[in-house]
Amino acid sequence: MFVGKKLVYLQMQKTGSTHVTKVLKQNLNGKTRERHEQLEDYAAFRDRPIISSVRNPWDWYVSLWAFGCAGSGGFHKYLVHNPWSEVRHALKYRKIGPIVNSLVRLVTHFGRRPDWKALYSDVKNEENFRKWLKLVLGPEGRNIAKEGYAASPVKEVIGFMTFRFLALVTAYDKWNAEGTKVRSYDALTAFVDANTVTNRILRMESLNEELLDLMQSIGKKLSMEDLEAIGKTNASSHRKYDTYYDDETYRLVAERDRFIIERYGYTMF
């Protein structure tokens, strides 16, 4: 994250967060903490705007997968090193259920796990992406222990993107004590409405325009040319995201990441 006297920016993976952070570092006094870190000490920063960013979920999953096809990213590393990474992450979050489940799966499913490495082998292979997505957002994905997802009952309500996003933009203590235990969509929306810590969410689809408006709102004069000159960073290489989907995978994202889609007005196109 970026912490400055004028604002705090929480980095959501694959939403242009590296670009935003670079702009902030070049134009504001502040410092960066560990990337994609949650704001545990929210009370210390509630006197200034807290910002994050979001992206069309259909596009986000393609980008996350394509980044992995290039051998990059923590999510890719977690999946290709299963089953051991599942066990390690379950132990990290010290939840008895996921620990037992991961150990049982280690024994009973050894040799029958998805071949994640093969699914990351070709960024142009639409079928690989669809298989990958159905695993990540289907029953197999409920066992993803990364970031505490498998240990959280809310995994039955939301997909991994929404889980990551809400872990950033809601109060840290409330998210871990209450949000991760939510078991219905209505309860989830009520929780978010009551516990959001961000004042503004930048949409990646119009990132520079919204970033320019943000900087101007805090008294920093920049031009669009200034922002565009910085260029994209950590971008994944792939074709237009909608070409990777069929009807089944389209509906899967629509169901599992319904919250982001409805809250920020996203559609497939």
Image (cartoon, rainbow, N blue to C red):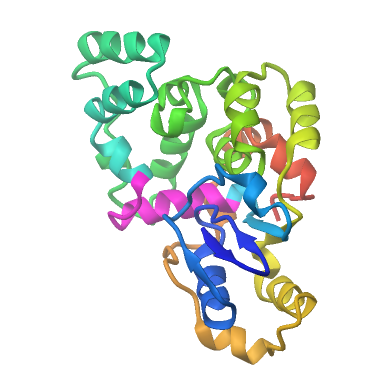
**Magenta-drawn stretch contains 69:** yes
Q: Nearer the viewer, residue 169 or 163?
A: 169
Q: Is residue 107 above or below residue 36?
A: above
Q: Is residue 39 above or below residue 139?
A: below
Give the residue displayed 40% in from the left and 33% down from the top.
146
Residue positioned 65% across, 34% down in the render:
251
Determine which quarter of the picture holds residue 105.
top left
Image position of 254 (left or right of 134)? right
Q: How many marks?
A: 0
Kindly give the residue lying farthest to the front in the view shown. 44
The residue at 41%/15% (across/down) is 95
Tell me residue 114's x, y (percent): 30, 28
In the rendered image of this protein, does residue 217 appear above or below residue 82?
below
Q: Which residues are magenta?
A: 59-74
Viewer-closest of 134 and 162: 162
Q: Which of 59/2 is in front?
A: 2
Q: Quadrant of the C terminus?
A: bottom right
Where does the image place residue 52, in percent across and percent down from the top left? 64, 56
Q: Position of residue 36 (x, y in %)?
A: 48, 51
Residue at figure coordinates x 45%, y 58% from the top left: 33
| Left or right position of 126 against 110 | right
- In the image, residue 100 sits, relative to residue 245, either above or below, namely above
Magenta stretch mostly in which secondary structure? helix
Is 7 placed left or right of 103 in the picture?
Answer: right
The x, y position of residue 189, in whole percent, is 78, 31
